[in-house]
Image: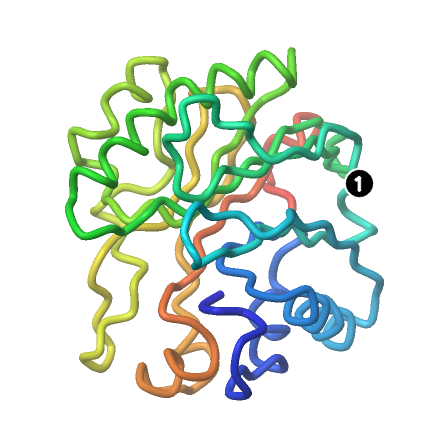
Amino acid sequence: IQHLGHGTNKDYQALGEVGSRFDFIAVQEVMTVEGIEAFKEALEAKTGEPWQLMHSHLVGRSSYKEMYAFVWRESAVEYLDGAVVYLDPGNLFAREPYSARFRDLKSQQDFAASTVHIVYGKKIAERVSELEELANYWQWLEEIYPNTPVMLMGDFNMPPRHKGWQTLKNLGVKPLLVEQMGATTLSTKEGKYANLYDNIWLRSNSLLVGDVGIIKFPLLLGLTHKEARRTVSDHAPVYMQLRNPRQTSQPNH
C-alpha cells in the first residue's frame, strides 16, 4: 500500500473495501504505526468483525525505511509463533524480509508467511542480487519453520520470468502468478497495467491452492488510475485461496 501512513490523501475506506475480500494480508510500504492501525480499523468497520495486526520495526539501510505488516481476520487465521525480521548476515537486502507462522482455522493448515519489498535501485543488478539471495533466505525460512509450508509474498520489482529468479527456482519454488495472468503495477495510462512485480512464491504441492489472481481495484472502486495511485496505491494486490483438504471440491473464502 503505497507509503501507508504518510500524507493526507490515503482513502482508508477504499483500502478497507479492497482488504475486506481477504482473510490474511501481507503489507509492504508501511511508513507509520498509525497508518497500519488505520487500515486495520477500516477492515473492522467494513466487515463488522475483529482483525489482528502485527508489524516489524522500520527496516532499511538508507535514510528511507519501511515497516512490513501482517493483518488477519480473527475468525479465519491465528498467529502461532516465530515473528522475526531476517538478520541478513551478508547485508544483502536493502529492507530485510519479515516472517511469522500462522494457522488457517478453516483447514487447520499451518503456514509460514514471509514478505519482502525488493529494492528498485538505480540498476537492475541491485534487484538481481536481492532476488538471488532469496534462495538462501528461503532455506533459512524452512530451517526456522520446520515441517511448515512457506509462502513468500511481496513486491519483487521484477517479473517472474527474469533470470535472476533462477536460484530460487532451482530449489523447486515457483510463482503462483505468471505473465499470462496480467500485470500488477498501475500504469499512468488509464486502464493499463505495466509490470507483474507482485507475486506469491511456494514449493509445488506444499499447500492446496485454489483460485489465484489479481484484484484490479480501480475498476472495483470506480476510480481512474490517477485517483487510485493518489488515494490507494500504485500496485494491485495479488491473492491465493487455500483449499480445505476435507472439502477438495471448493476453495475456502
What residue is drawn where x is 18% and y is 52%? 122
- Along the line of sight, the residue nearer the viewer: 221 or 57: 57
Q: Picture coordinates of residue 143 (x, y %)?
A: 59, 12
**Rendered residue at 45%/68% (across/down):** 2
Please count the marks in the image: 1
| Quadrant of the rendered image containing residue 194 | bottom left
Q: Is residue 216 visible?
A: yes
Residue shown at the point (77%, 77%) measured from the top left: 45
What is the x, y in percent for residue 185? 29, 63
Quarter holding residue 129: top left
Q: Position of residue 206 (x, y in %)?
A: 53, 20
Residue sitting nearer the eye, 191 or 9: 9
Percent across and percent down for residue 104 are: 73, 36
Instruction: Residue 24: tell me if it is visible.
Output: no
Q: Please say which color scheme the image uses.
A: rainbow
Q: Is residue 121 depicted above or below 10 in this figure?
A: above
Work out which residue is located at the far front of the displayed protein and give it.
63
- Please say if 56 is above or below 38: above
Q: Nearer the viewer, residue 55 or 218?
A: 55
Q: Residue at x 51, y 87 (%)?
A: 9
Mark 1 surroundings: few (<14), some (14-19) or many (≥20) residues within 10 A:
some
Mark 1 highlights which residue? Answer: 78
Badge 1 amino acid: Glu
Q: Is residue 170 above or below residue 56?
A: above
17 lies left or right of 162: right
